[in-house]
Structure formats: C-alpha cells, structure tokens
Amino acid sequence: MQQCERTDVQMTPIIFHIDVNSAYLSWTAVEQLKNGAKVDLREIPAIIGGDQKSRHGVVLAKSPVAKRYGIRTGEPVANAFRKCPNLAMYPPDHKMYREKSRLLMEYLRTFTKEIEQVSVDECYMDFTSIADRYHSPVDGAVEIKDGIKERFGFTVNIGISTNKLLAKMASDFQKPDRIHTLFPEEIRVKMWPLPIGELYMAGRSSVEVLKKLEINTIGDLAQADPKLITLHLKSHGRMLWEFANGRGGDVIQSEPEEAKGIGNSTTLREDAASMEEVRPVFDELAQSVGRRLKKAGKKAGMVSVEIKYHDFRSLSHQMQLEKPSNDPQVLKETASSLFLEAWSGEAVRLLGIRTSKLVDESEPEQLSIFDLEPPKEPDEKHKRLKKAMEELNARFGEGAVVKASLMKKSPRGHSGKEKPVI
C-alpha cells in the first residue's frame, strides 16, 4: 500500500515557470558591470527603451526603482520621463539578450531536458522526473534560482504548480528573486482574491466587460456562470473562466515538432502602429518561412499569424489555404489578410507567421478551374535574381542577402558589418 501511495505522488506533474526579472534591464546591467560600470541600473531609476534624443518608442523593461515612480512596461518612453525626469535610459541590445538567453537555457538543461522556452526570458520546466532528487520542489527551485544568480549575476522568479497556467501565475507574484507555489489547493487563498486584471490573458477590453458584469476578482469569475461569460466574451471568455478555476495544460513541449509546422517570428525594434510598418515585416518572415518549407521539401495547408501587443497580450489567427503552398508571396498575402482581420489597431511589438498541415512538396495537387489558365511567369531578369538570392542564402545562411527595401535604417555613425543587399 505504501508503494502505491508513493507512485501516485510521483505521477503528479510538477511544473516550474522560470522568468528573468526585468530581463532586458538586468542583462544590460550585468553586461555594464562586467565592463567596469560603477552603477548598477537595477538600483537606480532606469529603463530599456527607444531613442534617447527623440524619446520615441516604449518602455521594454524597468528597474524596481523606476516601478516606484509608476512607470509601466509597454508605456511610451515620453510618459516615463514625465513621471521621472532623471530617468536613465538605454537602447535594447537584442543580440546580447539572445546570447544571455542561450546561456540560461543551456544551464537549465543541465537539470533536465524537459524545457519549453516560450520567450527570450522565460520558460517552463517539467520537474516531475527529477523531483525525487530533492526533499521538495521548493528545494529544487532554490538550487536553480541561486545557481542562476551566482553563475550569471541576474535573478529569476520561479513559480511552481501542477500545470503551466498556475506555475505562470505563481511566478508573477511578488518579485524579484522569489519562489512561489500555487498548487490547486492554494487557488482560493492565493489567486481568487487578486484583481481580475491579474489573470493570465485577461486584457484591458476583457477586464472592462467583466467589471460591467460586477466581476472584479479572479474568484468572482471562477464562481460565475460560464454561459454568461461565454455570451459576452465568446470562446475567450470560456478560456478565462477555465483559467480562473486553475485549469491549464501540463504538457511541456521540450522539442519543437518540425514535422507539424514551420514558422518564424520577430520582436520589432519599435512598436508598429500601421499597416505600412507591418507589411515589410511579413515580407521578410514569409521569405524565411518559405525557404525553410522548401528546404524541408514541404508545402503548408494552413497559415496562422501571431500578434503580440505593446502590453504583451498575444493572439493568433489562422486560415486554411485553397491548396498547399510554400510560395513566400502566398504566405505574405495570407498573413497580411489575417492580420487585418485580427488587429485591434493597437501598437504591435511582435509578429510571427506559422504554417501547419504540411504535405510533401512532390504530392500531386487537385487543380481547380482557375488553375487551367497558365500563370503569368516572371521575366528572365527576375527569375535570375530570385535564383541568385536563394543560392546565396542557402550557402551563407538565412538572411545573408536581403532586399534593400527590407533593410532597417542604421543609426548615424554605425560602422558594423553590413549584409549584402540587392
């Protein structure tokens, strides 16, 4: 009997959500200190944001001191300076952030390979298989958290639960450098009293609707009639009701299943607020995804677009293609159409194109009546140009050659190595 009880305990999933505290600012601070800086950005009013002179762009990360001035991630930099005129601001260094992220994930995989990275600064870890090495999950989290601080010089929060949703909610409790649990039996005490806006995926517009229904806390939502919530917020409302009751997935996708889909996404240097800013991004992403599909010998039957807003709310929208394709032009036009259907008009900080329902490129296609008319062929000059671009990118790596129209403007005085353009 004792053995059976132990097996049951072992089978209960233990999921960690590991989140770097103010990642961009912390990583910038660590790098500056390594290079001899006398001041730690984490100890003064400081942000990572846009251009210092023009004060354009949004706050990407803030120090704990800046937070005390009421500065929020995602708000315009100009607003932040009005709240704190002596604010220190530094531009983002995404290349350095990617390297810090790579080193962090490499370290975490020394504990277990069951890691699902969901952004540059956060991941889920399935702790279940290694739980028996520690007296408790908290002890394991302490070892990981303190090891990161000692090895890399920055801090993380770790949330612990039996599913990803509750682990994510737990990691967002008091910061920085903390460990929190939110097991199902703790939901009523730790999660239900929180304001409804604290619930994962409860955006501004959803919160406004819920407050009109006199739902002010997560507990209010959890105990509400799900039919009423669905009536007002459709499927998103049903999902929020499930989240309020602590229901979420516990499957860690440690290895992306490339056979199921191919995609790419990018965080924009500055938030995009118009279709003119978005269209070239989709062009670049479609070229990348198209190349990867061709390299894998696949065509996609489904295209989805991923959008992350300035306040980190995310959504996706998908469409079945009339016939499978790996043509970048088809991918771009489909993604642009999906974006226009789903876009709220708010500033966007991340865009992505994902493809699924993949079929072999050689698989015969069902022709429609519209396919009987011969397609207009590009002229010989454009054929040679396209072929040359594909060969150079295949030889020197994706993005080695880009169209001049897609190049980002370099700041004056920049003297780095440039990509060839055509």
Image: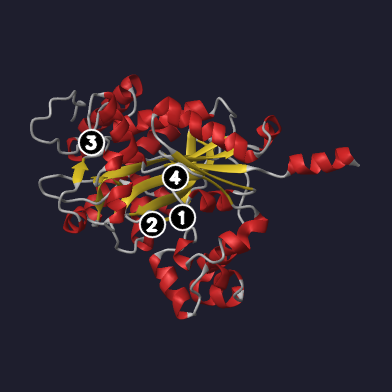
Q: Name the residue under label 2.
A: 338
Q: Is residue 74 visible?
A: no
Between the residue at mark 3 and the residue at mark 2, the CA separation in whole angstroms equals: 30 Å
Q: Which circle's residue, 1 or 3, is located before the other in the chain?
A: 1
* 3 vs 2, front mark: 2
Residue at the spot x=56%, y=52% of the render?
Answer: 165
Tell me the quarter of the image containing the C terminus: top left
Q: Name the residue under label 1.
A: 319
Between the residue at mark 1 and the residue at mark 2, the CA separation in whole angstroms equals: 7 Å
Residue at the spot x=19%, y=44% of the render?
Answer: 88
Q: Which circle's residue, 2 or 4, is located before the other in the chain?
A: 2
Q: Name the residue under label 4.
A: 354
* 1 vs 4, front mark: 4
Q: Residue 83 vs residue 367: left or right? A: left
Q: Which circle's residue, 3 or 2, is located before the other in the chain?
A: 2
Task: Judge the density around disc 3: few (<14), some (14-19), many (≥20) Cα neighbours within 10 Å.
Answer: few
- Could you tell me residue 45's position as x and y percent? 24, 47
Which kind of residue does numbered mark 3 sit on?
Asp
* Secondary element at image label 2: helix
Which kind of residue does numbered mark 1 sit on?
Met
Tell me the quarter of the image containing the N terminus: top right
Label of residue 379 in the image = 3
- Could you tell me residue 416's position as x and y percent? 17, 25
